Amino acid sequence: MLYVDVASWQAELDGLLNTVGPRFGRSEPRERAARYVGGLVAGLERKNGWTLAEHAGEVSPDGMQRLLRRADWDVDGVRDDIRDYVVDRLGHTGAVLVADDTGFVKKGDKSAGVQRQYTGTSGKTDNCQIGTFLAYVAPAGHALIDRHLYLPESWLGDRDRCQNAGIPADAELLTKPRIAIEMLQRTIDADVPFTWFTADEAFGQVKYLRVWLEERDVFHVVATRCNDDVFARGIGAGRVDEIIAGLPTRAWQRMSCGDGAHGPRVYDWVRVPIRPWWASGRGHWLLARRSVSDPTEIAYYICYAPRRTSLATLIWVAGRRWPVEECFKQAKQETGLDDYQVRTWRGWYAHITLSMLALAWLAAVRAAEALKGEPRPTPTSSSRSASPKPAA
């Protein structure tokens, strides 16, 4: 991870803040938002209302709380500006979109959407909110470009509780795959350049999401559960774990899916063509990844891509999911993603969006630092109909 000297890149941050400026109805919230973001990237140990207010020279957190809860600004408009900024700085036709969720552990039962539910953040069932995000992963870097607060059914069945938390009356019960579809549709409508989509089992095991992706010709490598059923060519119908277990040892190939924090991430891989019928120029595969140190540890993926797509490319795409975890880690450690002290629906979206803005700026700066002296990738229109190639 590259260290960023905030002062030396202040002009870049100011430019981004000027870009989102028209989304604010008045100068006061626009200026306070700039101070809020300045605090998010200032290296404070904690980035809550009090510490951000103190950093901005304010005597209380009231102004910062007002910015998040009810100040006149277009929060979703700023989200769209962040996405466009990320594309401008990192955009690449071979980019991968990644859907994932993260938890925000909370006390009490007043925060919008909070309940006892499983979160990978603590690795257990905890009292928390769950946010579903879409990340943009390109050769030059990665950042979060969309977000949605998950609302459990227990909340939507209690309209008084929703009203107290500022949840809109028309809020719907959306599963995480449905949330992913909404975010993907916004991204497609905005002509964001990308080639692939990937996600973990919570999303990939859901067949209506895979059907939606195919109908829009979105190439994907998505994880699925071990008991998912498929039709494998030359083998027949069955569970994916049983189909993979029946393959000969020589079918497996040892390959890396990319570098991690400790070097190349090497696994054994195999793929099997599935589906009795393929559309012209397209193919479907079951992909499996087996741990080298523990051969009983196997992950499964459903893949849809151009017919001539190589095994190496599918493996590369499967490995592009890890940057979203890095986005969450960086955003929580460096831009205060989980440091908020607001309970309302609007407050959550406002804080998360400004944290995403700060993270996007950091991603752009790090990309620029890393590419000094090298030509930047030129943002181009989407090429999802072209045959993709893994990044170098």
Image (cartoon, rainbow, N blue to C red):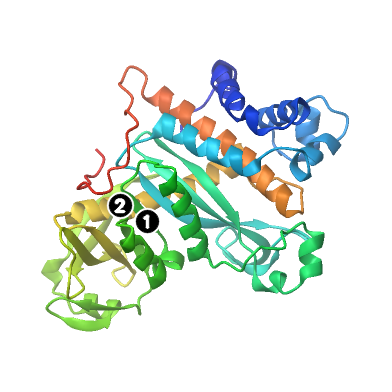
Q: Tell me which amino acid carries mark 1.
A: Thr
* Residue depicted at 52% across the width and 60% down the height: 179
Where is 118 relative to 392, above or below? below
Q: Quadrant of residue 168?
A: bottom right
Q: Quadrant of residue 262?
A: top left
- Asked if residue 109 can be seen in this view, the reply is no
* Residue depicted at 60% across the width and 40% down the height: 77
Residue 218 percent location from the top left of the image? 32, 55
In this rendering, would 205 be left or right of 301? right
Report the front residue among 350 and 168: 168
Q: Quadrant of residue 19?
A: top right
Say which mark, if any, is on residue 317. 2
Report the front residue among 289 and 39: 39
Pointers 1 and 2 in contact (C-beta within 8 Å): yes
Q: Tell me which amino acid carries mark 2.
A: Val
- Disc 1: CA contacts within 10 A as few (<14), some (14-19) or many (>=20): many
Looking at the rendered structure, the secondary structure element under dot 2 is helix
* Residue depicted at 15% across the width and 61% down the height: 280
Residue under numbered circle 1:
198
**Cα separation between marks 1 and 2:** 7 Å
Residue 326 percent location from the top left of the image? 48, 45
In this rendering, would 50 be left or right of 245? right
Looking at the rendered structure, the secondary structure element under dot 1 is strand
